[in-house]
Image (cartoon, rainbow, N blue to C red):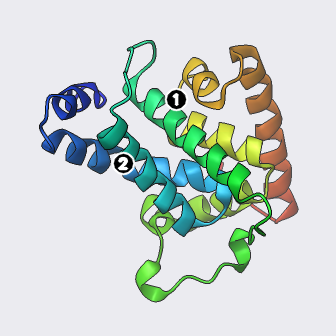
Amino acid sequence: MDNGESSYRRLLAGDDEGLYEIICSYREGLTLYLNSFVQNIHIAESLAEDTFAELAIKCPKFSGKSSFKTWLYAIGRNITSKYLRKNSKLDIIPLESQEFLEDEENIEKNYIKNEQKQHVHQALHRLKPEYRQVLFLAYFEEFSNAETADVMNKSKRQIEALIYNAKKALKAELERSGFVYEE
């Protein structure tokens, strides 16, 4: 698959299978990225659904200036920004205090396999939202600095500085919580 672009073209041509392929390919990663904004996996899932609904209903034009994934994540970020502006008076419950039902073990359990990765992921959630977002895009989603800059609406230079500072903050957070590095 060529990163979703051909699936989107098929969707625009009337083939609903194209939307299904896009959802299957990007649902998990997009949801986790949006969770870095809202800190609630259920709201993030709903915002990801809204993103896919926008593709299906409004059929925005994909210009090809970036990868399809970068474009899709930018749409998700815009939808999430609108949600946050609209609901800015709501209290955000920290991830550590959220209780998940057994059948809602959450996408993160599937995405993060071993104990060490979970420890790093928990430390990541204790960072500033901007640091979480840049590290998630650069390392979990493997976006280039240019793609990350497009999604976060920043310059490439700002992203480089942000990654540097975020990695420093993550290291400090891991050391503060007693994380032991593998040699």
Badge 2 element: helix
How far apart in space, not on screen, are marks 1 and 2 (Cα)?
Answer: 24 Å
Residue under circle 1? Answer: 143
Residue type marked 2:
Ala
> To which residue does mark 2 refer?
53
| Position of residue 155 in the picture relative to residue 24 (left or right) | right
Q: Which mark is residue 99?
A: none
Up the image or down, 41 lies above or below 21; here it is below
Residue 96 picture location, percent across and down: 71, 74
Picture quadrant where residue 9 is located: top left
Image quarter (top left, top right, bottom left or bottom right) of the N terminus? top left
The residue positioned 71% from the left and 58% from the top of the image is 125
Q: Position of residue 134 (x, y in %)?
A: 67, 37
> Residue 36 at what x, y percent from top left?
64, 52
User: Relative to 102, is 181 above or below?
Assistant: above
Q: x%, y% of residue 90?
A: 76, 67
Query: Is the Cβ of the residue at disc 1 closer than 8 Å to that at disc 2?
Result: no
Q: Residue furthest bottom?
A: 102
